[in-house]
Amino acid sequence: MAEEKVRQIGRHRMMTHGPKAGDPGKIMKRLSSFIMKRYSVHIIAVIICIFVGVLANVQGTLFTRSLIDDYIIPMVKSGSRDFSPLLSAIARVALFYSIGILSTYIYQRMMVEVSQGTLKDLRCELFAKMESLPIKYFDTHAHGDIMSVYTNDIDTLRQMISQSMPQFLNSLITIISVLLSMLFLNIPLTVISLIMVGVMLLSSRKAAGISGRFFSAQQKSLGALNGYIEEMMTGQKVVKVFCHEEQAIEEFKKRNRDLFVSAYNANQYSNILGPLNMQIGNVSFCICAILGGALALSGISGLTLGKLASFLTFNKSFSMPVNQIGTQMNFCLMALAGGERIFALLDEEPEMDSGYVSLVNVERREDGSLSETAERTGIWAWKHKHTADGSVDYVELKGDITLDGVDFAYDDEHFVLHDVELYGRSGQKIAFVGSTGAGKTTITNLINRFYNIQDGKIRFDGININKIKVRDLRRSLGMVLQDTHLFTGTIMDNIRYGRLDASDEEVMEAAKLVSADSFIRHLPEGYNTVITGDGSSLSQGQRQLLSIARAAVADPPALILDEATSSIDTRTEKMIQSGMDSLMKGRTSFVIAHRLSTVKNADCIMVLEGGRIIERGDHEELMGQKGRYYQLYTGLKIAN
Amino acid sequence: MEKSYESIPAREVIRTLGREVKEFKFDSIMTPVSMVLEVVMEMAIPYLMASIIDKGVTAGDMQHIKETGGIMIVIAVAGLLFGIMGAHFGARASAGLAMNLRLRMFESIEAMSFPNLDRFSTAGLVTRLTTDITNIQNAYQMILRMFMRAPSSIIIAMVMAFVINRRLAFIYLIAVIFLGIFIFTMMGRVSRYFAYVFTKYDDLNESVQENVTGIRVVKAFAREEYEKDKFDKAADNIYRMFVKAERMIILNMPVMQFTVYACILLISWFGAHMIVGGSLTTGELMSLLTYCMNILMSLMMLSFVFVMISMSAASARRITEVIKEIPEIRNPEDPVMEVPDGSIKFDNVWFSYYKDKTGEKDCILDDINLDIKSGETIGIIGGTGSSKTSLVNLISRLYDVTRGSVSVGGRNVKEYDLNTLRMSVSHVLQKNELFSGSILENLRWGRENATLEECIEACKISNAHEFIDRMEERYDTRIEQGGSNLSGGQKQRLCIARAILRRPKILILDDSTSAVDTATDARIRRALKDYLPGMTKIIITQRISSVIDADRIVVMDEGRINGIGSHEELLRNNDIYRDVYESQNSGKETPDFDTK
């Protein structure tokens, strides 16, 4: 419950502040350095290739001028039939073109590696980072938002890196070289072309502005519709049971219509952008043609027919990259917003781990002292390395767990646990009871450091758990969580998740121990049945059995069972009881359950209320106290 | 459980999509028309340009330059106009298609029955209604705007080239044919490979999803490194496949450039000969070169459209699959419109979830015979997977029997109008949902025109009134999506209230009080008995205390009825029942700590 609350607070925060309008330049810089660190040689080669490609292209366009001015017209005038100079010129241009084609191909091929490689690295870094984040992060971020970083944000970034960035570079170099060539050909006409480019940019901005307004309206109605779809699909069976189909369709129609209107407006205006720029480009072409024609006729600025022809070609190839830069720029801004979310995730503070005590397997020597070994001996020890003199201590793992004056709040403000004292001796079974939100799950989440406490101390075999390496601490604690989660893979793989080097026999042994073996054997492929979608084809009870088996195969020194059998019917539970008992035997176990049968034989029962332990003792003692436990137990008072 | 989409033939897909275009036929026709007109305008420009150079500049005719230039500007404006029209109609047609497809899908889903829904996952349906639709919308707009435009641009450019100079135009014709063949064989291969890569990509994202939702398990078992290794391998695999696919795509560009440049050089060479020979003007040569660029651009556009189409083909199939799904449970012809009473009869009922697997071994209900009188209270108890839920699902025809029959009010359930039947049989599902909206709105799902008083009364019976009353806005309190701001027990009590508001003849509670404490549970049962005595009540539970005072209790075991009788009878002669009883009551009255 408390976690749910934190999650809501987190969501709320994200919604009110919206996506931060970060500095795109900064993100661009960071992205570039991310790429440059890995592919600096590639990038330099790409830039050179693009440059060469553009130059070769411009050479080709300039050839149109010299074709007419230097070859055709003189030949027409002189009436000569000697085509050999033209042939060698064409051969020269063909060489240029070949270089252009080759360099374009090379840079594109390199960009494939750069973009895909960068994305792969980003994905892997994202995933590695995600795995290192504290549970709190997942509480405060909607899972859909985290997912969309991997899907939407990475996808737009892919387009940006592989298409927009080279395109952008290409356009920029083209514009510069074309502009230079145009200036070289005729200055007044160039000025006119530039003015028309200005007009183009201005009108694009206008149209993009209108379209942008509709796009955010579209985004809003899309969100409204998608939210409705998600809710209706999740509750579809309820809709049918209540014959609510008609109403659902009516509401859907309304939202669907809204989306249609905004989608069509948004697309309409963004579609106009292309033709608008193209026709402005054409007008620019016309104006230059008319003025150029007049100039060429009057012969004032030395504009020849061939020069005019080239200029007009340049004019046409000038407006295209300008247009390109506009659209690519828009796209880049969008992609960079995604990039910002990617880097925000990468910048998250990982789980704190300053522990230096590690968990190792040990052998007992004849003299009783412990020595480290790589084999599984069944005896564990905490390896305590003293930094001062480099000496190493081994403390045998017994499973004593104590909480001393522990205060805890999910958000540093609203404390959900107050001054919790708890002593779990090796091999004891400790049970927590209390109403929802009393803090039972929270306590177990503190022991394995899913969350860090604000005040007090938690010790494992006398060692402050902050000194133990987080992963070793967790390896020493077998957990069966309230919400079962299974992974895509076979049943065998899922149980083996507890201990990766467990043999098939050991896996089956564990399954038998918790009475999961029989139902598994009834599945079509037995242990090799593939589970998909979090095991949605299994019943909740079966999934719980699997997650208990998973903890059993891990063979941990201590166990945390959080409502581990809540969905297993009482009869089956009774059947697995002996298995559970042997699983818990010799291990310190923390058990959360609302069923008496699960709790009654605990060595110590903690009754929690409002984040405090209000009663403690074994069943007999607590019954004798006639307090809260007695009330809960006899049903005299409602716990809710 | 997701269905594969390989089975639906392309013709079927196109027909299904085509039906939804009808409403926007005008827009769909006008878009390519406008685009073609835009192309005509654009294509006229190089022609006029040639005229300016030849007849104007060379002949020194300023008047001609001005006139032709003026015409060119007019044509540019007209082109813009057609462009805007194309933008408008294209956006409308594609957004319209998306709207209609979405609605048709949604309607189809609403018409589906439980067996149909089981075949599609919730997440799958959401994706189909959102991402897949967006893909289709974009692809349709692209097709409308480009599919006619690009070929007509090529054709017009070709025609113009032929008009200018037939011999030189042949060079284009050869180039276009060569490129066309190349692009289409190439793109066919690439898009097939891409389709494959994208399924792998989906798998990768799915594993991320699993890690996000299951992060506690990953951390509890300290499996971060293991997951990282797994992910790195998968990501590396994806990287390789994408690189391979994109390397195929980029071959496009050099081939295209090569062809175009070859054309330019050939035209220059032969053009020069012709000009010197007097059979071609310089202006015409210029135009020819411009058309060459036009053809190149159009071909690139066309290949892009082709990729779009093949990429969205999978989406189209997935959408069609939902629309074409035939509801397994339908209204009978000439349905019975009233349920006379709340009696239920199971007659040799066999049931399997799989239509194609109906052997005795596949059935999870084996030959059930059960007679329930109207007004009776029946408890059903049994272990995990003993098919309790499957049994009651047959009463309101959420599923149909495989063999045998189920009757309500003396008639086979298949004879009733579905809505009539479900109005009379109120089913509180095990996995229940509330919807975002006020408490009152949620309650009125039960009966639309229920008054506030009636709602309060129902809530009093289900013991929900007390907590609603304590809320600040009482019955106007907003419920968040999925009821996330309510506790499990509160949700369950609201769901019961919603179900009894319907005033059904039969009420089915499928583990509906599992999160409610025993005392409240007892009060709910008491109230149901006192206020709704004539209603048949079926209570599925794991708690003995919930069924202890039922008229009869049915003990289910592995799909069979293991015993029927009152609490006392079963205690005496049913082993399973006694086991369950003892597992819960080791001599004590209450089995649970009522903690939820």
Image: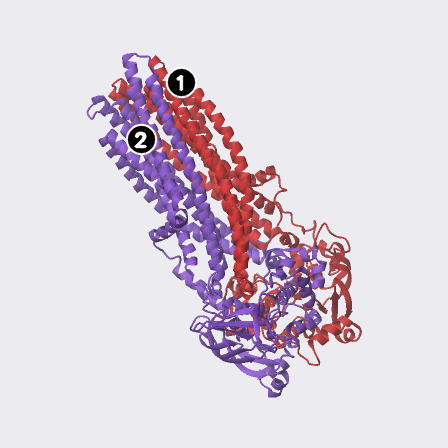
Chain colours: A purple, B red
Please tell me whether mark 1 or mark 2 is closer to you in this view.
2
Q: Residue at x 25, y 29 (%)?
A: A185
Secondary structure found at label 1: loop
The residue where tag 2 is placed is A314
* Observer-nearest of B133 and A304: A304
Does residue B382 show up? Answer: yes
Q: Residue at x 27, y 22 (%)?
A: A305
Judge whether A460 appears above or below A129 on screen: below
Q: Residue at x 64, y 77 (%)?
A: A596
Residue A366 x %, y %: 61, 76
B5 horizontally vs A222: left or right: right
For disc 1, the neighbor class at 10 Å (few under 14, some 14 to 19, many from 20) is: some
Q: Amino acid at mark 2?
A: Phe
Q: Amino acid at mark 1?
A: Asn
* Observer-nearest of A27 and B459: A27
Residue A418 x %, y %: 48, 79
Secondary structure found at label 2: helix
Residue A440 x %, y %: 55, 74
The residue where tag 1 is placed is B165
For mark 2, name the chain. A
* Observer-nearest of B106 and B218: B218
Cα separation, mark 1 vs mark 2, equals 24 Å
Does residue B503 show up? Answer: no
